[in-house]
Image (cartoon, helix red, strand yellow):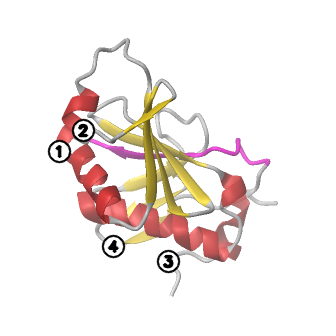
Amino acid sequence: MSELLWDDVKSFFDLEWEGCLPDVWVTGTTVRDWQAVLDLIAVSAWRSEYSEGGVVMPTPCAGDVLSRPADAECAYLRVWPTPDVLAIFRLQSAEEIGFDVDLRELQGQERLDVLCGLLGAIGRRLVKPVVMTPEGDWDQSHPVLGFDPESDRVVLLAEPPIS
């Protein structure tokens, strides 16, 4: 059974709603947590591609990426949990794990299930909440949905907007 039903959340996935690239966050993390996520991606069936400054290269260990100089090229890890759904991880800080998803790729129950599976896999691996916020909600004050480790499932964290 699906963790969330499309009809209950589709207003949060409206392409006109607060931008098409909502942010997903895990806060209070460490280099060890980042490495756990990199390990999860490596052992999963998900395709991934690591790059620095647009140059694709093998994925280094989290400690190496996160200890690079502040002015180093941006490090990104693109992850496809399915061929048609992409999550772009920003390897910028040990203190939080952040990535974007594209609402255009998350339309309908099947794609929502992919997102819930991704959030759940990360949350279970880290035993931490994983929250999705509107694009640009950098202080994470408006969480929409997320993985709740206490209930071991993805839950709604806000009331859907009234259409």
Image coords of residue 46 (percent x, y): 44, 62
- Neighbours of disc 2 within 10 Å: few (<14), some (14-19), many (20+): many
Image coords of residue 73 (percent x, y): 42, 19
Query: Which structural element holds mark 2?
Result: helix
Which sits earlier in the primary sequence, circle 2 or circle 4?
A: 2
Marks 4 & 1, CB-CB < 8 Å contact: no
Can residue 102 be found in the magenta stretch?
Answer: no
Which sits earlier in the primary sequence, circle 2 or circle 1?
A: 1
Could you tell me which residue is drawn at 72 percent across and 55 percent down? 104
Q: Which residue, given by chain and number where applicable, does mark 1 sit on?
A: 32
Kind of residue sitting beneath label 1: Arg
Q: CA distance from mark 4 to mark 1?
A: 21 Å
Image coords of residue 57 (percent x, y): 39, 36
Marks 3 & 4, CB-CB < 8 Å contact: no
Query: Which structural element holds mark 1?
Result: helix
Which sits earlier in the primary sequence, circle 2 or circle 3?
A: 3
Farthest residue, direction top: 71
Q: Which residue, given by chain and number where applicable, does mark 2 sit on?
A: 62
Query: Which structural element holds mark 3?
Result: loop
